[in-house]
Image: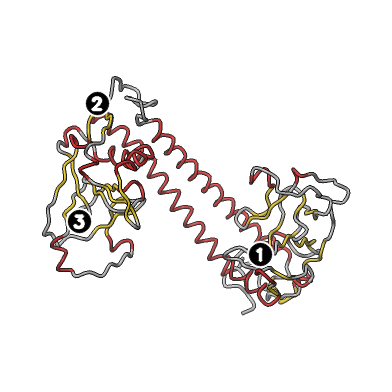
Amino acid sequence: MNVPEIRFKEFCDYYSDVLLEKCLSVSNKKNNKLEYKKEDALSVSDEFGVVNQIEHLGRSYTGNNISTYKILNKWQIVYTKSPLKLKPFGIIKVNNNKPGIVSVLYAIYDVKEGFDPNYISVYFEPNFRLNKYLLPLINKGAKNTINISDETALSGEVHIPLSYTEQQKIASYFQSLDSLIQTTSKKLASLKRIKAASLQSMFPQEGETVPKVRFKGFEGEWDFVTAGEVFKTTNVRNRPDLPVLSATQDKGMVKRSDIGYQVFHDKSNETTYKHILPGQFIIHLRSFQGGFAHSNIEGIVSPAYTVMEFKNKEFHYDYFWKYIFTSKEFIKRLELITYGIRDGRTISFDEFKEMDFFIPSKLEQQKIASYFCNLDKQISLQTQRLEKLKQIKAACLDKMFV
């Protein structure tokens, strides 16, 4: 097929099969006049493209003699020849940032008239298309080194529109999509940092009896309690009519069928599984998140899990304790009472119940939990948005090219 599956409606010409050398020409300009310094050294990242080493990596990795380094100008194309796990023959990127210097091992190309540099870069972004192009051109040397000349890298065939306007429009679309992905990623990272900082400041840390940050209207000391004063275990069984639940890292207890997790077992054994209700907790054998999970649904869990609940619900709010159990401070303390097994950690309720905590009134617990629940909703929304944007981009990288 000589036209892509998805295309801007104003374009209808067939795509052309051309050698990449018709689009690019080799540039061998060196830094022999030392117009660029070590602080101008650039690296090429599959995720971030061409970046300044100091700004991105915190330091310059150049050698003492930078006069032999190649100059990479803005809008030039760079081919790294450095293997990555999913791109074993190297990566091809456009430099749409400041000019600088790169390793002499890299290939640098000028983009010829009639071809858009951003289009060339996005054309080679998907693993499958880049690897398919480079595989026939590569000779692998000793120790898996990549042997390919700058000129040979241009001898393969690409399938592109000869309309410069269409190239620009496609490149612009992906730039807009990348901008949305980047903005969403930053927003998600910011929310996660806020949550981590809040978990530190809104719960008492070691040596503290009250947190550094509290909501207006709440004063006074938090109460000192042991886990054994707050929780008791429960061991209700014989409910095979209920769904089997599993512990997850980010969602607490979920239906096993909802996560596609298939464990083949004798269903008659489900009569021995433990009954768990919304608002209860389990202690499991997994090491993530300290090994505690909160449930907001009813179901049954493996007999290997310990199910626990409040002794007196009048004084405690389950979501508040959910965030205690996922805090770094709690997980760090928990390490002192766990003992190793080959693929995780075993947590004893008898030892856990000796742990002590400072807790506020139930009203303040609810206020704190509400704040974190709202944060989690925002994190979930941004996570879903980011995943959807990445799916859209992946589909477009496949269907908007031949």
Q: To which residue does mark 1 refer?
A: 90
Mark sitting earlier along the chain (2/3):
2
| Residue type at tag 1 | Gly
Whether residue 22 sits left or right of residue 343 in the image: it is right
Q: Secondary structure at mark 2?
A: strand
Q: Residue 45: image x %, image y %?
A: 64, 55
Q: Position of residue 365 (x, y in %)?
A: 27, 32
Q: Secondary structure at mark 1?
A: loop
Q: Nearer the viewer, residue 244 or 286?
A: 286
Identified at 28% across, 63% down, the residue is 257
**Mark sitting on residue 344:** none
Q: CA distance from mark 3 to mark 1?
A: 49 Å
Asked if 226 appears above or below 188 in the picture, the reply is: above
Q: Quadrant of the C terminus?
A: bottom right
Display colour scheme = secondary structure
The disc placed on residue 299 is 3
Q: Which mark is residue 223?
A: 2
Q: Residue furthest bottom?
A: 1
Image coordinates of residue 117 in percent, x first then y, are 73, 60
On screen, 119 above or below 340?
Answer: below
Kindly indicate whether the residue at mark 1 contacts the one at mark 3 (C-beta within 8 angstroms).
Answer: no
What amino acid type is highlighted by mark number 3?
A: Gly
Name the residue at 32% across, 64% down: 261
Query: Of the residues under marks 3 and 1, which one precedes in the sequence?
Result: 1
In three-dimensional space, the C-alpha distance between marks 1 and 2, rounded to whole angstroms, equals: 59 Å
The reply to whether callout 1 and callout 2 are in contact (CB within 8 Å) is no
Q: Is residue 169 left or right of residue 392?
A: right
Quarter of the image where one finds residue 26: bottom right
Q: Earlier in the sequence, mark 1 or mark 2?
A: 1
Which of pointers 2 and 3 indicates the residue nearer the eye?
A: 2
